[in-house]
Image (cartoon, grey):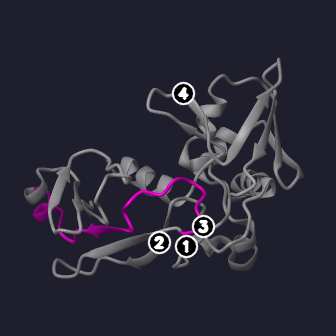
Amino acid sequence: TGSDFANWVAINLFRGLVAIGRDFEIEPDLAERFTVSDDGLTYRFTLRGDARWSDGEPVTADDFAFTFAQMVEDEVEAARWLAGVSASAPDARTLEIRLAEARNHFLHMLGQPAHFAWPRHVHARRGREWFKDVPLVGNGPFVITERRAIGDERSPGRITLDSAPLWYGGGGNIREVRIELEASPTVAMSAADGRASWRLRGPGGAEHELQHHPVYTADDLHTLKCAVLQG
């Protein structure tokens, strides 16, 4: 679905305090550790010391505190989940979140792309249009380096992601992701049987088609090409 695709792109450009594992378990991500008070109302996160935005600036606790407050002020869709939530940054690597009432799903909420941090220093310079920049400043394993709007049937759109050299995580073998945005949903669906077609291209030219999210640490693969259906 469109939301599946958007989430897949988001988690490759940005990361959250925690991640959701294959079995829905909570795993550390930008936060290397965290504690929860006995009453479930206070969460304290310690951020990784090596986390960087793709422009070299450190990822700080203040980025998260700012983002949550800004989401509420901007009335973005995710803000409805932040009612009764307050966040503060006692120091650059410590984030404290207080809830008005306990929520047993709160950590899973923080693992969703909708609640990933924005780069405060970029927002201060660009305002609400910050996310339109190319390259787009993020803190995930890839960076948007090209964003071309759809023209017509002969001029499909394209999003290109390059691997982020400053990302703290273990690197795979894929250097580039090309996401082709088909101009004609009818033609695209006929070719892909109504689903997004994911293709992995290796250095020898061989392609492997997937129907699920690709694993970007696969051996021998240097380019990931995705054809995405629009409309």
Look at mark 4 in the image and give the residue it sits on: 25
Sequence-wise first label, 2 or 3: 2
Q: Residues within 10 Å of mark 4 (few under 14, many from 20)?
A: few
Which amino acid, by three-letter code, is at mark 2? Ile
Q: Do the residues labelled 2 and 1 touch (CB within 8 Å)?
A: yes
Task: Indicate the quadrant where residue 156 lies.
Answer: bottom left
Look at mark 2 in the image and give the residue it sits on: 144
Which amino acid, by three-letter code, is at mark 3? Leu
- For residue 89, above or below residue 101: below
Query: Which of these two is toward me, 224 or 116?
Result: 224
- For residue 48, above or below residue 22: below
Q: How crowded is mark 1: few (under 14 residues within 10 Å), some or many (20 or more)?
A: many
Disc 2 versus disc 3: distance between alpha carbons? 14 Å
Q: Residues within 10 Å of mark 2 (few under 14, many from 20)?
A: many
* 90 left or right of 138 in image: right
Disc 3 versus disc 1: distance between alpha carbons? 14 Å
- The residue shown at (78%, 22%) is 40
Q: Are marks 2 and 3 in contact (CB under 8 Å)?
A: no
Disc 2 versus disc 1: distance between alpha carbons? 6 Å
Sequence-wise first label, 2 or 1: 1
Q: Which residue lies furthest to the right in this view?
A: 90
* 165 left or right of 48 in image: left
- Magenta segment boundaries in residue numbering: 165-189
What numbered label is drawn on residue 136?
Answer: 1
Which amino acid, by three-letter code, is at mark 1? Leu
The x, y position of residue 93, in whole percent, is 82, 51
The x, y position of residue 212, in whole percent, is 27, 44
The x, y position of residue 166, in whole percent, is 60, 67
* 31 left or right of 91 in image: left
Sequence-wise first label, 3 or 1: 1
Q: Is mark 3 on a helix, strand or loop?
A: loop
Sequence-wise first label, 4 or 1: 4
